Amino acid sequence: GSHGLLAVELLSSMRGRLHQPNIVTYNSAIHACAQSQLSDTCLELLDEMMSCRLPPDTITYTTIIRALDRDHRWQVALQLLCLMQHQGPEPDAVAYNAC
């Protein structure tokens, strides 16, 4: 879990220095958290992105869906897939295959 936690700390550090994280930095942090089996932290970062008006992309959602699937949280993964269908971005084959 150390890589995921380090990524979250780096995001916090960026904001503390008045640097606005972008989609690439969020996706990188979410990926690190997913690899560290921190699916709840992935969801927290998604919420943070949305509250900052930074729209998540297909990579964001697919990464989180895969993390949720690995944690056997398929119901939450399906909710995210539905969110993609209604709010965008349109899920692609990778997103559908992730869960």
Image: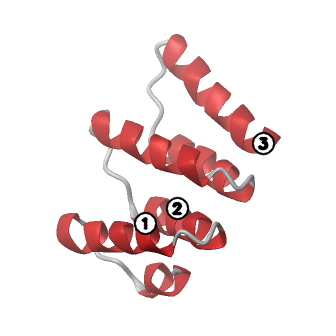
Name which residue lies at 39% across and 82% down: 92
Give the distance between the C-alpha atoms of the residues marked 1 and 2, in whole angstroms. Answer: 10 Å
User: What amino acid does circle 3 point to?
Assistant: His
Residue holding disc 3: 3
Which one is earlier in the sequence, the residue at label 1 or at label 3? 3
Q: Quadrant of the N terminus?
A: top right
User: What amino acid does circle 1 point to?
Assistant: Val
Question: Looking at the image, is 96 positioned above or below residue 6?
Answer: below
Residue holding disc 1: 76
- Residue 55 in percent (x, y) is at 31, 50
Q: Which mark is residue 64?
A: 2
The answer to whether the residues at label 1 and label 2 have Cβ atoms under 8 Å apart is: no
Residue furthest to the top: 17
Q: Quadrant of residue 93?
A: bottom left
Name which residue lies at 37% across and 42% down: 47
Mark 1 residue element: helix
